[in-house]
């Protein structure tokens, strides 16, 4: 799976944060500061909590466009989770995993501090209480994989039940029941034989991982030690504000951690 990026954020920051700045050069004496922290707060609320009202107002975009931000954030997390834990879900399982990650992001905790004007633009910090339930769970997921493989092997190698007539040479049960003789042999055969459908070990494994993740959602844990991500927002000579998407990605990976 290829990793998706929030490419539209470049346009969002350049367009929405540069309102009224076109044609200006920096620095300009008396130039009014923008509420950059307000924009970042709106952006993160949209990304993680799917709360889009502020972003729609500040960026002048539709709700449909704003919700793409949350969808992309969730999809990125699913890709990272599958890559880290070497998972190969089906399309249906992928959708279930997206629901899990969306719910996890909705529980994230962070605080955007006020921006500080610098010679090159703006500097601000985001303090984060990371969700740690899905971090470093290699051993747990390996156990689920082993259990799935064992269960699938046992199911696929199970012996069929004894067919009628196989216990006694005369083909009757010990009481010689006429009812047994009149029964439909084809029906008995179909009940005794395996269905022929093998249990897919990988599918069973992913189902177990999904159940594990949903259980973790019900017992969310946060790192008691707050982490701080610094954002260095540059301002061009035209007044446009530019944010390195790697910094936003770092926040994504910190609010919901998969690796230590």
Image (cartoon, rainbow, N blue to C red):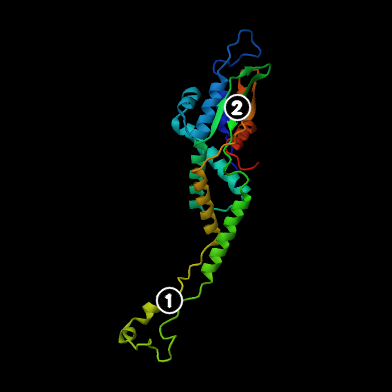
Q: Nearer the viewer, residue 246 or 12?
A: 246
Q: Which disc number belongs to residue 126?
A: 2
**Pointer 1 residue:** 192
Q: Which disc number belongs to residue 19?
A: none
Q: Is residue 194 above or below residue 254?
A: below
Q: Is residue 51 above or below residue 58?
A: below
Q: Is residue 97 above or below residue 128?
A: below
Residue that appears at 45% across and 70% down:
195
Q: Nearer the viewer, residue 79 or 183?
A: 183
Secondary element type, mark 1: helix
**Left or right placement of residue 104 versus residue 241 in this view:** left
Structural distance between the alpha carbons of marks 1 and 2:
63 Å
Q: Position of residue 130 (x, y in %)?
A: 58, 35
Q: Residues within 10 Å of mark 2 (few under 14, many from 20)?
A: many
Q: Nearer the viewer, residue 46 or 31?
A: 46
**Left or right placement of residue 188 versus residue 212 in this view:** left
Q: Position of residue 143 (x, y in %)?
A: 60, 56
Q: Are marks 1 and 2 in contact (CB under 8 Å)?
A: no
């Amino acid at each position: 799976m290829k990793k998706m990026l929030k490419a539209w954020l470049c346009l969002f920051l350049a367009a929405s944060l540069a309102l009224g700045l076109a044609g200006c050069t920096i620095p300009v004496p008396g130039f009014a500061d923008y509420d950059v922290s307000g924009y970042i707060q709106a952006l993160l609320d949209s990304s993680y909590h799917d709360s889009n009202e502020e972003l729609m107002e500040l960026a002048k975009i539709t709700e449909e466009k704003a919700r793409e931000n949350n969808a992309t954030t969730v999809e990125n997390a699913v890709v990272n989770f599958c890559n880290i834990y070497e998972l190969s879900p089906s399309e249906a399982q992928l959708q279930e995993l997206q629901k899990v990650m969306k719910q996890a992001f909705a529980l994230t905790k962070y605080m955007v501090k006020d921006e500080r004007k610098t010679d090159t633009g703006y500097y601000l910090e985001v303090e984060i209480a990371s969700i740690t339930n899905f971090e470093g769970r290699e051993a747990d997921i390996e156990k689920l994989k082993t259990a799935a493989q064992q269960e699938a092997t046992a199911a696929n190698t199970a012996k069929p039940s004894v067919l009628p007539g196989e216990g006694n040479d005369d083909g009757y049960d010990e009481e010689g029941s006429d009812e047994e003789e009149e029964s439909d042999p084809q029906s008995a055969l179909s009940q005794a034989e395996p269905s022929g459908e093998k249990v897919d070990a990988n599918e069973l494994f992913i189902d177990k991982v999904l159940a594990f993740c949903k259980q973790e959602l019900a017992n969310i844990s946060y790192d008691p030690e707050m982490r701080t991500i610094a954002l260095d927002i540059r301002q061009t000579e035209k007044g446009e504000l530019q944010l390195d998407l790697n910094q936003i990605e770092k926040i994504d990976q910190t609010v919901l951690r998969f690796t230590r």
